[in-house]
Amino acid sequence: QVQLVESGGGLVQAGGSLRLSCAASGSIFSASVVGWYRQAPGKQRDMVAVIIRGGSPNYADSVKGRFTISRDNAKSTVYLQMNSLKPEDTAVYYCNVFYGRGRDYWGQGTQITVSS
């Protein structure tokens, strides 16, 4: 079992920046996919950014050019740098680490609120 703890959420004005961190209790070196998802009130959970092992990051069209995902295997941490935030980015953000073979872990979520 791997525990994921997210941090870095909060309230920010439009145009501002935040950096989310997701610390895993176990190694993420062998994870097939690490990523960030978000869920706004009344909406489904959507992919924001993912990194597939050995590949390049993939981003939702709505965040391309503004968000950057990265992973530090040595620290077992996944990051999401969010710049030029917009009110429509307001949501609960979840970290995900997927190893395959039924090993799929989610963080508890962190609230991001962007005021206009």
Image: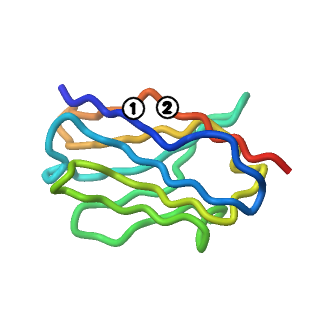
> From the viewer's perspective, is 84 left or right of 79?
right
Mark carried by residue 107: 1
Callouts 1 and 2 close, C-beta under 8 Å: yes
Image quarter of residue 39? top right
> From the viewer's perspective, is 86 left or right of 75?
right
> From the viewer's perspective, is 34 left or right of 49?
left
Residue visible at 70% across and 41% down in the picture: 113
Coloring basis for residues: rainbow
Query: Which secondary structure lies at badge 2?
Result: loop
Q: Position of residue 18 (x, y in %)?
A: 57, 54
Quarter that holds the N terminus: top left
Query: Which secondary structure lies at badge 1?
Result: loop
Residue bearing the label numbered 2: 109
Q: Is residue 50 above or below residue 100?
A: below
Q: Amino acid at mark 2?
A: Gly
> From the viewer's perspective, is 67 left or right of 25?
right
Q: Position of residue 91 (x, y in %)?
A: 65, 39
Image quarter of residue 93? top right
- Nearest to the observer: residue 57 or residue 25: 25
Q: Position of residue 108 (x, y in %)?
A: 44, 27
Q: Is residue 25 above or below residue 114?
A: above
